[in-house]
Amino acid sequence: MKWRVFERRTVWWPTRCGWACLLLPTVALSLGWCFYGESFLSPTSRLPADVLVVEGWAGRDSMPAAVREFQRGGYRLLVTAGGPTGDSWAARNWNYAELAAEELLRDGLPKEQLLIAPTNESETRRTYHAALAVRRALEARGELPAAINIWTRGAHARRSRLVFAKVFRPKTRVGVIAWTPAGPNPGRWWKSSDRSRDLLDETVAYLFELLLNSGRWGSAETVGLPGAGTTPSWPPRNSCVAACQRSSCSSRLRPWPAVFRYFQIFPLNNPPSPALAVRRAAGKGTPAACRPRARASARRYCQAAPRRPPMRQPALGLRRCGARHRPESSPAIELG
């Protein structure tokens, strides 16, 4: 047997017609996105709603227009959303939600119709955390409207509506209003460096949110997300952690103890009996205020969970169930 370093092989290669068939759709899609991509990412679709949500990062210039929209649309409540403005090394960080509220009050918005929903998240998934803070602020007031409209900036509009719709589903419909600043280059986006950067960033971010949920699959941030589907997941993510997050516990429970308890409640092959799962779900490691919800969640899962094949290894399930814990939002601030 001879040792060879190279050998001859026959490969299939596209012809000129084949290259044309492969490249023409790509070129057509790229040209179409160049001319119509900005308008696709910047829709305006108002709904008959009582609540207008203003994203504070849209800028000071957009606040007078937001007040006019509030007065013209007959809204009952305006909610400002946003996170910190600076990095963690800044001497003092402001919050977009609070800055927007101050500007709206100066523009003539009544205090009794204003609700501030700040969030502490400024690194990643800011839109998602802002939407979650708005929902919690509305639920704290005891009202969850049937429809809301989102006031945001330019090409961010379609992604904002997608994220808010995921957070507020299934009871609340979400509309969007895209505000575009009047700049020196009102024509095509390639005439403005800011609009070009926004289009490129939002194109990637929208696809990331649409296809991959912005990387939130299986993380602790999706645990207990309002409006999530009712299909049981494997391993389950809706028992101990969700119970502690939704209950009135004074201190938050880190997800790791509950994650280890998952593998005590649910073995790696098939779920146990409901009675055994309920006893283990409300064990000593679960706070007293969380135990009723933990029992109910374990009972529902055992009744609905299908027979599943064994998982490959516990460490894989731990990585899927547990992620690092960080506070998602701060309590809402209501002026009045």
Image: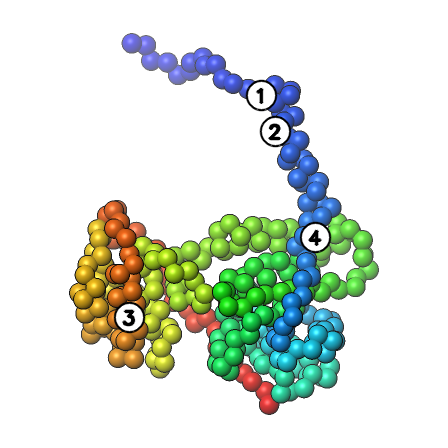
Q: Position of residue 26 (x, y in %)?
A: 64, 35
Q: Is residue 264 visible?
A: no
Q: Nearer the viewer, residue 138 or 56?
A: 138
Is 170 placed left or right of 30 in the picture?
Answer: left
The kind of residue tagged 3 is Ala
Q: Choose the circle earlier in sequence order: 1 or 2.
A: 1
* Residue at disc 1, secondary structure: loop
Check contact, mark 3 vs mark 1: CB within 8 A.
Answer: no
Q: Tell me which residue sits at (49%, 17%) in the image.
A: 11
For the view shown, which residue lies furthest in the top direction? Answer: 1
Q: Choose the circle earlier in sequence order: 2 or 4.
A: 2
In 3D space, how far apart are the residues under numbered discs 1 and 4 (Cα atoms)? 34 Å
Check contact, mark 1 vs mark 2: CB within 8 A.
Answer: yes
Q: Choose the circle earlier in sequence order: 4 or 3.
A: 4
Q: Which residue is mark 1?
A: 14
Query: The N terminus is located in which quarter?
Result: top left
The kind of residue tagged 2 is Leu
Q: Nearer the viewer, residue 267 or 191?
A: 267
Quarter where residue 68 is shown: bottom right
In 3D space, how far apart are the residues under numbered discs 3 and 1 (Cα atoms)? 60 Å
Is 267 placed left or right of 207 in the picture?
Answer: left
Q: Which mark is residue 38?
A: 4
Q: Which residue is mark 3?
A: 296
